[in-house]
Amino acid sequence: MEYWIWLSLLPYIGPVTANRLLEHFEDPSRVYHAEIPELVKVKGITGRQVQSIAENKSLDHIWKLMDSCEKNDISILLKNDVRYPKRAKILEDAPVVLYYKGHFQDMKDPVAIVGARRCTQEAKYKAVNLAEQYTKSGQTIISGMAKGIDSYAHTACLKAEGYTVAVVGNGLDICYPSEHKKLMDCIIEKGVLLSEYPRISTGNKAIKIYISTQKPSDQCMGGAYYCDCAGERKRSTYYGRIWQKVRAAGGYHIIVLLEIFMNKSTTFGYER
């Protein structure tokens, strides 16, 4: 496990390069022990990345991190684990390590419901209604545990005794927002809390977003995604957060159906 975490935290090595290294070497321990002549053969790797691998051999911080996770009841999920979300695993930039609290079960036909923090009562009603309907049909509800639509979706699912997944952009040693502590505890008890980051000091990485409006892509790998945009002025920034929340649940293309307010769909991608 320590070599997986080491690979995920290497300076200048993002998830795309980490996955290419795994594709080439098959195991992170082999990446750790690889010599420079072998490293340079990896597709797309830069000199700075090779240097980073060669110079960062200490595992002391990894042991400390693993100890910190244990003390904070944070579990570690590796990409080669059968519980790793299947739709996330096929992404080019799938995190090689995920951190979680709670328990995994089969995510049957997952539906991601995300939206504005400040929303209308009508939007709240529709979000709750959607979450209840999908939960009663046995589907998993995925959201980001933020204020507004996200929390309404999680809560409706839990009340209907369903399974819900919260994908958050911060470390799992804190509750954000802080007033959602009770909600977070319920998700951990009856679902799972997921993050790329084990603690607050490693979270909140920025990601560039581009947006194009078109019909739903044939490349979408299944699942329904609902969004309410009421109350949000800076939509491009907001939609960036949508991608971060649901990319672990869906395919490379995220289809957000804005059918509540407009008669069109929007396809999201990202630059890395």
Image: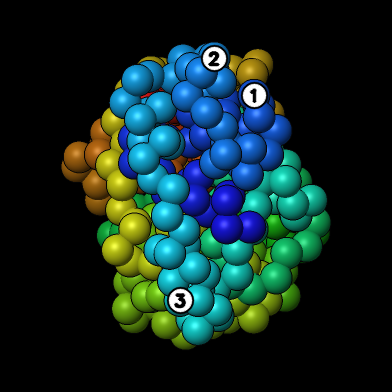
Badge 2 vs badge 1, beta-carbon distance below 8 Å: yes
Q: Which residue is mark 3?
A: 68
Q: Which residue is mark 1?
A: 24
Q: Which residue is mark 2?
A: 41
Amino acid found under the numbered disc labelled 2: Lys
- The answer to which of 139 and 37 lies nearer the viewer is 37
Q: Please indicate, yes or no, whether residue 266 appears anywhere in the rendered image.
A: no
Q: Considering only vertical position in the picture, is 54 above or below 147?
A: above
- Residue beneath the point at 47% across and 24% down: 36
Amino acid found under the numbered disc labelled 3: Ser
State the separation of the CA atoms marked 2 and 1: 9 Å
Q: Is residue 13 left or right of residue 92?
A: left
- Residue beneath the point at 63% across and 32% down: 22
- Which is closer to the viewer, label 1 or label 3? 1
Q: Considering only vertical position in the picture, is 145 above or below 53?
A: below
> Which tag, 2 or 3, sits closer to the chain's start?
2
Residue 160, horizontal then vertical, whole percent: 69, 73
Task: Classify 10 Å Cα crowding around label 1: few (below 14), some (14-19), many (20 and above).
Answer: some
Callout 1: helix, strand or loop? helix
- Which is closer to the viewer, label 2 or label 1? 2
Choose top left, top right, bottom left or bottom right for residue 248: top right
